[in-house]
Image (tube, grey):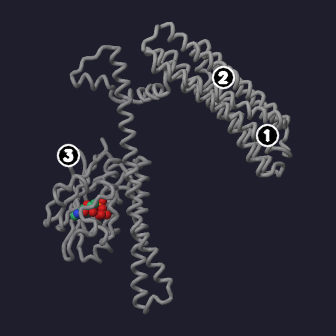
Amino acid sequence: MTTTRSQLDERLRQIRWDLSAMIDLVAARVEEVTEALLERDVAKADALIIGDDELDLMSQEVEETCIDTLIREQPVASDLRAIVAALHMNSDIERSGDLATNIAKAVGRLQGSKADDRIRELIVQMGHEARYLFEQSGIAYRNLDAELAASIDELDDVLDDLHRDFIQAVIRGATHGDLVPQQSLQLALIGRFYERIGDHAENMGERIRYIVDGWTPERAGADRARARAADHTTAADRASHAGIGVDADQEVALSRGLAVIDTIAEERRIDATRRAFVANVSHELKTPIGAIALLAETLADADAGPEADRDRLTRHLSREVKRVGDIIDDLLELSRLEEHDPEAEPVRIDDVVHESVDVVRGLADAHGVSLAVVGVPSGIELEGERRQLVRAVVNLIDNAVRYSESGSQVTIAVDRLVDGAEITVTDTGIGIPRPELERIFERFYRVDRARSRDTGGTGLGLAIVRHVADNHGGRVVVDSKVGAGSSFSLQLPLPAD
Ligand code: ADP
């Protein structure tokens, strides 16, 4: 069924008129409920609670009119905005009415409390501010005044500040024993109710701006994203690289659109990575912690068996505890690497190599693997953080030892490159299948899970190495052949002279 434009206009006018009346009603209710609260007037509060039905009824009518209009009329873009915004405002107003009713309900529960003057004064101010915000949004709506609507956001800050002071006053009252816990809680809730009424008024301001010029908070977010992205390559640049011609207007729209998509895609990616990481960490820790719990229980049991069994269990327990410790240690290292740029101090590569070899020597001896250092002294000095570099080289030697057979040798070589230096750790161990080479630098990725675990791996060693390389402007290169061995090179740039 089609109706004429004037009928549509009439419906829209009706919706606006009804909503304005509801806004005025809520503003008045906020005023009245504040009075009832200060006067501890339970009868007045009860009347307000009953009166809430009237507001619900009005809200229901507005909702029906809006939906009816959407279905029966053929609203064009700006009318659609008016109706969609009206539906949202309707629920903002209704909820604010509910909040005022909640305050009224608290009046009865506050009987006998001794709120001090400061608390009472803040209630007066919060009530005043909440009412004022509502009135302003009513005026902005009636006049479709986008500027006034936008200012509600700032006006709401006053209420937020009052609310903060109020909560502090209530806490002080509770601490000094002037208020019993029940009453403090009621008062704290009341403060929160006022604050939320302000939030709804702020929402209404946003809806009004949407009606007037299509402004949405999402779009404000998009503008911020665009400003951030403008520091990097602009989307228009990318479009022109791709051979897409853009004129000036399109350029703005395009760059904004792409910037938003970029930011969203990036945020989603980070989010997904973070979730996967948390899941991985939990999974990695679950197994050893489960084992620890079981072993500890068995050991605590007086009938655990002969001394030899107890020793075995204890050793097992220590191993699992060490594993948890190692994982946590590596996780902390990773987060340190992510948070801080490395120190830029002069570091001698020879010192890094010697210190790293010293750290791994014990493990190598235990595995029956010998360590050979070649090309040192090299005299090469670079800029970076010695601790990080040692950690990276230790991880490489540690892996070389753990994935080698007893009786073999691991070589650590230092070489000068055209524009940098290289530390290469070579083993003749099990090697890594080619398709896995891409993945071994990922956190918790292992080619052979069981072997990594048996040899005390955390699955984070190479992720740390790559991070250290990145932090120093370098890279890690790997070459490996299954059954023949692997060679990892940490390549680092040298400082310009
Ligand atoms: P892990 O603690 O498990 O050794 P890393 O991040 O250090 O974790 O290494 C990831 C995976 O890469 C290992 O689980 C292993 O499968 C493989 N790997 C690393 N270094 C070597 C090596 N020198 N020889 C064979 N495989 C290796």
Q: Residue at x 33, y 74 (%)?
A: 362
Distance from the alpha carbon under mark 1 to that under mark 2: 23 Å
Residue 227: percent from the left, percent from the top?
A: 43, 26
Residue 22 marker: 2
Q: Amino acid at mark 3?
A: Val
Q: Earlier in the sequence, mark 3 or mark 1?
A: 1
The image shows residue 395, relative to residue 257, as above or below, that is: below
Say which element carries label 3: loop
The residue pinned by badge 3 equals 418
Count neighbours of disc 1 (C-alpha within 10 A) and say few if under 14, some if 14 to 19, many if 20 or more.
Answer: many
Q: Amino acid at mark 1?
A: Val
In percent of width and height, residue 290 lies at 43, 71
Query: For the residue labelled by badge 1, is the local secondary structure a helix, a strand or a loop?
Result: helix
Residue 367 in sight from this viewpoint: yes
CA–CA distance in space, label 3 to label 1: 81 Å
Q: Position of residue 424 (x, y in %)?
A: 22, 58
**Front position in the image: 231 or 121:** 121
CB within 8 Å, label 3 to label 1: no
Give left or right: position of 293 versus 55: left
* Ligand 1 occupies quarter: bottom left
Q: Residue 200: which quarter of the image?
A: top right
- For disc 2, the neighbor class at 10 Å (few under 14, some 14 to 19, many from 20) is many
* Label 3 within 8 A of ligand 1 by Cβ: no
Q: Secondary structure at mark 2?
A: helix
Give me the disc on residue 107.
Answer: 1
Q: Is residue 489 above or below residue 259?
A: below
* Residue occupying image coordinates x 70% and y 31%: 52
The C terminus, quarter of image: top left
The amino acid type, in three-letter code, at marker 2 is Met
Name above or below for residue 210 compared with residue 461.
Answer: above
Please indicate whether residue 164 sits to the left or right of residue 425 in the image: right
Upstream in sequence: badge 2 or badge 3: 2
